Image (spheres, helix red, strand yellow):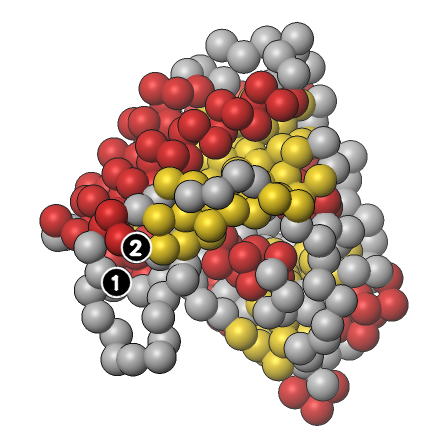
Amino acid sequence: MTSSDTSESDVLAQMLAFAEEAAPLALTMRATGLDMTNKGPDLGQALTEADLAVSQLMHARFGPDLIEEETAEDLGQAAARALLARDAWTFVGDPIDGTRPFAGGLSGWGVMVAACRSGWPRSCVMSLPAWNEDRSAPAQSIPAEATEGILLAASEGRAFWAPTRGGRMIAALRPLHRPERRTGHVGWLSVTAQRYTLDYGCGWFPWSEGGAISDAALLATGRLDATLSNNRLWDLGPILPLFEALGFRLFHWPDLGDPPAAFVDLFDAELSAHDDLWLVCRDRDQAADLAAAIRPA
């Protein structure tokens, strides 16, 4: 168990060590071959043996101080609220975010985990081990040990990145700063696309390459100007510290209201935010401009 006395730097080291195990495991299992199933009748919720293997690893590394996708429904909102409210560290993770691109041999997936205390995510690590796909030639299979990607992290209000090969860092963490360029594009994941439409005449255009983790990577590395969130606790928790370290904030659509003081209050009894849309923007002016371009589906 990680106590309230554990420093944030030690917590970051613990999450980095987990990512250095989980990402190579996922790459190896994908290269060996995977069967993909669905979580019940909802074909949008995919599952592979690798999701379960990384989930087991996550429980082994973080023990009872963990809220993660594959077991969160058994935990329930009341227990999640109690864990997140403590002074001690609580971890929120997604074993493999972007299971469909993962199983399909695409690049927009990864493993991610956040450390939370006193009601809010404070630090995070996310590894996208296949992110650096070579698009200068037709798609091809790359051996797990040669696959290149990126690791993103945030701790103590600062953002970092490092290149990876085979799921492991090949250089030390280096500072990551918010890109100032503009692309005119906003993250537009499939859940959002089911519920909202975007008025292109307002100058905003959608882009998505997988799940929440790839959306975060696109925003953090300057490929997007803003993004949206109306997914689940384990989708937003592991990426929110990175957004905040880069100077992005949450704004409620359409009123631009501020988020609640407690992270768990962003979500309903199923730990989902599907009835609420949150804009991830640089400032209120940008949020107002983006909000004006969004319509209910």
114 vs 226: above or below: above
Which residue, given by chain and number where applicable, does mark 2 sit on?
A: 147
Q: Residue furthest bottom?
A: 201
Q: Locate residue 52, reporting x and y percent.
A: 26, 36
Q: Residues within 10 Å of mark 1 (few under 14, many from 20)?
A: some
Residue at left offset 35%, top offset 79%: 136
Query: Is residue 79 found left or right of 56 in the rendered image?
Result: right
* Residue 43 visible in rendering: no
Query: Is residue 109 found left or right of 254 in the rendered image?
Result: left
Looking at the image, tell me whether mark 1 or mark 2 is earlier in sequence order.
1
Residue at left offset 43%, top offset 41%: 169
Kind of residue at badge 2? Thr
C-alpha distance separating marks 1 and 2 = 12 Å
Front residue of 20 and 251: 20
Kind of residue at badge 1? Gly
Q: Locate residue 261, reporting x and y percent.
A: 78, 35
Query: Is residue 31 found left or right of 80 in the rendered image?
Result: left
Q: Which mark is residue 188?
A: none
Front residue of 291 and 132: 132
Residue at left offset 62%, top offset 23%: 9
**Image-quadrant location for residue 111:** top left
**Image-quadrant location for residue 56:** top left
Which residue, given by chain and number where applicable, does mark 1 sit on?
A: 105
Front residue of 119 and 11: 11
Residue at left offset 62%, top offset 12%: 6
Q: Residues within 10 Å of mark 2 (few under 14, many from 20)?
A: many
Q: Residue furthest right?
A: 285
Per the image, label 1 sits on a secondary structure element best described as loop
